[in-house]
Image: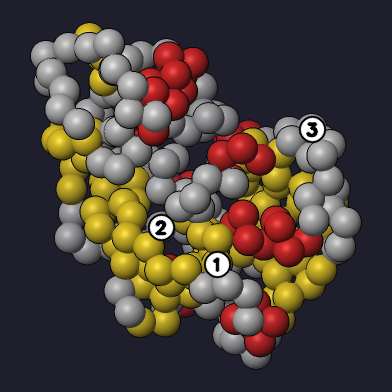
Amino acid sequence: MSYDPNSKIIKGRERLIEYRKAFQKKQALKGEIPQGEGKLNRDGNPTTPPGQRLVDSWPVLDLGVTPELDKSTWNLTVSGLVKNVKTFNWEEFSKLPQTNDISDFHCVTTWSRLNNHWQGVKFSDIADHCGVLPSAKYIYIKAWDGYSTNLPLEEAMKYDVLLVHQWEDKPLTKEHGGPVRMITPQLYAWKGAKWIGEIIFREHDELGFWEKRGYSNTAEPWLNDRHC
């Protein structure tokens, strides 16, 4: 789908949502595009969000605590508003449907790495496995290093949100959140947790680690939505 790079830039989140829905349905885009540079990606967003620079490496950022985890000691608990509260060990997690995907990684510290090859489990497949109740509207995520973050359920259920255990055809290393981390390609990367340990489905929202410290609760890269 072609677009005019000189067209009006979308600045509001509601308008951005409307644009994405129109793009998915291949409807007219009315001369507006999200902020950023480059060709439109599969979701209708310019390749590089505003304020980002492209890198070839994958910088390491965390709270300064690296938990001693491997496949034998890691587990993931799914709790809250679900029919089946479940704790997955590695063997059980690896038996869930596995997905390969290529997506981009946008860090709020102004760098982006494009075309990452991932393997893991879709968040939506985990949600379906545990039977999310209709009253659940948000998720709260806890990680093994004490980190936390939060998402609207609608965002977490997007097709490209994965709990990954491989990157570039190799097991995810400890420094990058291995054995399992969550990725949120359509949001800034802090909305996905390294060393993910628990997913809690809730009716209400609760701010996570960075959200309590002034980071945006919506984290839209194509709105340059970094801080409150």
Is label 2 or label 1 in front?
1
Which residue is label 3 attached to? Answer: 204
Q: Of the residues shown, which amino acid type is indicated by label 3? A: His
Q: Of the residues shown, which amino acid type is indicated by label 2? A: Leu
Residue 121, which numbered label?
A: 1
Is label 3 or label 2 in front?
3
Q: Of the residues under marks 3 and 2, which one precedes in the sequence?
A: 2
* Residue 51 seen in the current view: no
Q: Spatial distance from mark 3 to mark 2, Cα to Cα?
A: 29 Å
Q: Residue at x 30, y 33 (%)?
A: 44
Q: Is residue 182 left or right of residue 31?
A: right
- Give the image location of residue 137, x and y in percent: 74, 36
Please rate how many residues cluster around mark 1, counting C-alpha atoms within 10 Å: few if below 14, some from 14 to 19, many from 20: many
Q: Residue at x 73, y 75 (%)?
A: 88
- Give the image location of residue 175, x and y in percent: 43, 72
Q: Is residue 89 left or right of residue 174?
A: right
Q: Quadrant of residue 220?
A: top left
Residue furthest toward the bottom?
72
Q: Of the residues under marks 2 and 1, which one precedes in the sequence?
A: 2
Q: Is residue 92 left or right of residue 210?
A: right
Q: Are marks 2 and 1 in contact (CB under 8 Å)?
A: no
- Give the image location of residue 94, x and y in percent: 60, 81
